Image: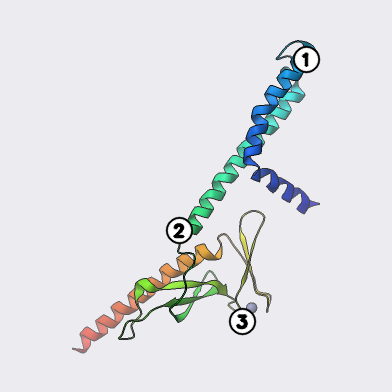
């Protein structure tokens, strides 16, 4: 029952355009009904019950509008990272957001990691058994990561693609630091 109500609510939040139509159409419809039943265009519109309906429609419109903006922002953020990257060799695992990311990239002819080639492969892996995780969208916009083998579960605010973008930044920073360290050691050896 609770699940049904939630999905009904979410369905209503998704009907942004329909909520606009209802908000525009209902005063017109009620004005016509008022005109034909009472002879006055506005008489029925002063009825508290009708005003309640208008109020609810307005709340629906505002809620679905806010929901739409939140959804758009979320999608924009997700598409900012390079979503479909492939190739390169596995450089190493990176622990981030309590799961394991496979950092991939290329090396130069000396065997050094090319920092800008690094990216985090998706999906992330289970921290316990290294199985690739599955991702499910939760009803309120967060995500559930689940291991099909050992049952590991984690709720995360953002999806794999978004977090992969952040794991990539951390990997690039680490590569940069390793490079600096190597350069320092090289200088000391001379
Ligand atoms: Zn597992």
Q: Which class describes the residues within 10 Å of circle 1: few (<14), some (14-19), or many (20+)?
A: few
Residue, disc 1:
36
Q: What element carries label 3?
A: loop
Foreground mark, 2 or 3?
2
- Judge left or right: residue 179 versus residue 50: left
Ligand 1 is in which quadrant of the figure?
bottom right
Residue 169: x and y in percent read 41, 67
Q: How far apart are marks 1 and 2 (CA)?
A: 55 Å
- The structure residue drawn at horizontal position 73% and vertical position 29%, both measured from the top left corner, is 53
Residue, disc 2:
80
Depth check, front residue: 179 or 27:
27
Check the image and report above or below for 43 versus 111.
above
- Judge left or right: residue 116 versus residue 76: left
Q: Which residue lies furthest to the left in this view?
A: 190
Residue, disc 3:
129
Residue 42: x and y in percent read 70, 15
- Mark 3: C-beta under 8 Å from nearest atom of ligand 1: yes
Count how many numbered circles sit on residues in the image: 3
Residue 58 visible? The answer is no
- The structure residue drawn at horizontal position 44% and vertical position 72%, both measured from the top left corner, is 119
Depth check, front residue: 60 or 25:
25
């Amino acid at each position: 029952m609770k699940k049904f109500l939630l999905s009904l609510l979410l369905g209503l939040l998704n009907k942004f355009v329909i909520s606009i139509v209802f908000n525009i159409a209902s005063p017109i419809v009620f004005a016509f009904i008022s005109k034909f039943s009472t002879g006055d265009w506005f008489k029925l519109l002063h009825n508290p019950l009708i005003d309640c309906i208008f109020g609810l429609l307005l709340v629906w419109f505002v809620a679905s509008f806010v929901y739409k903006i939140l959804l758009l922002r979320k999608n924009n953020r997700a598409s900012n990272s390079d979503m479909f990257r492939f190739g390169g060799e596995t450089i190493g695992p990176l622990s981030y957001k309590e799961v394991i990311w496979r950092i991939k990239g290329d090396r130069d002819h000396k065997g050094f990691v090319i920092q800008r080639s690094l990216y985090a492969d998706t999906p992330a892996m289970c921290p316990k058994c290294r199985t690739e995780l599955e991702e499910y969208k939760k009803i309120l916009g967060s995500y559930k990561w689940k291991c099909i083998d050992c049952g590991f579960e984690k709720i995360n605010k953002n999806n794999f693609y978004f977090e992969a973008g952040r794991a990539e930044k951390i990997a690039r920073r680490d590569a940069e630091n390793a490079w600096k360290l190597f350069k320092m050691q090289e200088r000391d050896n001379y």
